[in-house]
């Protein structure tokens, strides 16, 4: 496996790409792109440095080989077969074993949401990064056999590369099949998710992702959802064990951690970007949620 460490800072902001190494933050030319892991990573000495995609959702599937993944600062050592899903705006990077066998699927996240609309319980499973490992003792395990995921990835890659009639419809069908296979492999039952509660939670998290820099009130976000603050808090606590304000604050803290770890911006500048006019208040907020001051957290992140 390549030996260079993930997360070296060479820019003042975390890079945002369409496909890795390609400038811009918009969508790919088609709404979906499929390529082998080696096609792009071998051009970069098997290392994909930390970056993000503002609008794109990715699925990485390793059939054979080893890799190290970094997802929002957390490291995972993987041995194939394994799968990783990366929602939009997630800071992620990889170091691959040369010659690794697998695929990367890149698709507009909005299209994934629309594709999963008929089953309200599915999209919440992918709102945060997931790691599934059938071949590793150190990464989160996955249920069942990887055969369904393997078959679905191969079928999707085949439709993407082909030119048969109704290609786009076939691609959507195979993408839905792949997402279902991944969802069924996730540890823990998904029964009971297909209710209004996860729909409200999914919409709330989408609002939080879109507005957290403005630090909106929970009451205003609940009103947009058409429910009361009390109802929103009950949903959040029932589904995640945390209140609605806790989720909002956690999203602000996550973005602060990303900026501290992956950029050279001053702590004052990061605080201002996240809606804190008072640097002292930002420091107290961050320390309360993360257990360290921003300065100490950045130092620890850079030490590896």
Image (tube, rainbow, N blue to C red):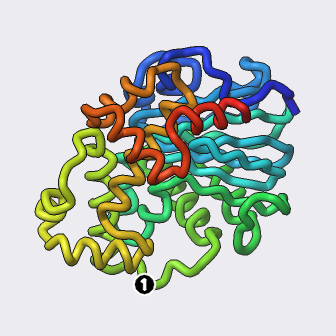
* In the image, residue 106 above or below residue 242: above
Q: Which residue is mark 1?
A: 192
Give left or right: position of 170 versus 49: left
Q: Quadrant of residue 234?
A: bottom left
**Residue 45 image point, x, y percent:** 79, 20
State how many labels appear: 1
**Residue 178 image point, x, y percent:** 57, 58
* In the image, residue 21 above or below residue 256: above
Q: Give the residue at x 34% y 32%.
A: 279
Residue nearer the viewer, 195 or 295: 295
Q: Give the residue at x 18% y 55%.
A: 217
Q: Quadrant of the N terminus?
A: top right
**Residue 110 image point, x, y percent:** 35, 46
**Residue 189 image point, x, y percent:** 56, 81
Please, which residue is most extreme toward the bottom here?
192
Residue nearer the viewer, 281 or 114: 281
Residue nearer the viewer, 194 or 268: 268
Give left or right: position of 292 versus 47: left
Residue 170 visible in the snapshot: no
Give left or right: position of 99 versus 273: right
Q: Quadrant of residue 34?
A: top right
Residue 97 visible in the snapshot: yes
Q: Give the residue at x 75% y 47%.
A: 62
Q: Quadrant of residue 119?
A: bottom left
Q: Give the residue at x 54% y 55%.
A: 174
Give left or right: position of 150 versus 265: right
Q: Residues within 10 Å of mark 1 (few under 14, many from 20)?
A: few
* In the image, residue 57 above or below residue 138: above
Residue nearer the viewer, 207 or 57: 207
Question: Regarding mark 1 in the picture, which secondary structure is present there?
Answer: loop
Q: Quadrant of the C terminus?
A: top right
């Amino acid at each position: 496996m390549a030996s260079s460490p993930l997360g070296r800072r060479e820019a003042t902001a975390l890079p945002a790409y369409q496909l890795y190494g390609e400038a811009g933050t918009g969508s790919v030319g088609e709404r979906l792109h499929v390529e082998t892991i080696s096609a792009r990573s071998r051009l970069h000495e098997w290392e994909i440095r930390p970056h993000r995609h503002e609008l794109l959702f990715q699925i990485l599937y390793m059939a054979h080989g080893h890799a190290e993944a970094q997802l929002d600062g957390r490291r995972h050592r993987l041995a194939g077969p394994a799968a990783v899903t990366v929602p939009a705006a997630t800071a992620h990077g990889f170091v691959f074993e040369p010659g690794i066998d697998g695929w990367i699927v890149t698709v507009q996240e909005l299209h994934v949401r629309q594709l999963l609309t008929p089953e309200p319980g599915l999209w919440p499973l992918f709102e945060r990064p997931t790691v599934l490992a059938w071949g590793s003792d150190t990464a989160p395990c996955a249920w069942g056999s990887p055969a369904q995921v393997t078959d679905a990835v191969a079928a999707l890659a085949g439709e993407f590369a082909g030119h048969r009639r109704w290609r786009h419809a076939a691609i959507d069908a195979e993408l839905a099949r792949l997402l279902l296979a991944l969802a069924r492999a996730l540890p823990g039952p998904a029964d009971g998710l297909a209710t209004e509660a996860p729909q409200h939670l999914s919409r709330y998290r989408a609002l939080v992702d879109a507005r957290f820099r403005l630090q909106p009130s929970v009451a205003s976000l609940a009103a947009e959802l058409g429910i009361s603050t009390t109802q929103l808090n009950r949903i959040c606590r029932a589904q995640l064990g945390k209140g609605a304000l806790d989720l909002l604050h956690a999203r602000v803290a996550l973005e602060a951690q990303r900026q501290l770890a992956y950029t050279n911006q001053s702590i004052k500048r990061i605080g201002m970007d996240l809606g804190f006019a008072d640097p002292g208040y930002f420091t107290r907020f961050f320390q309360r949620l993360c257990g360290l001051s921003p300065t100490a957290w950045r130092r620890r992140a850079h030490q590896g």
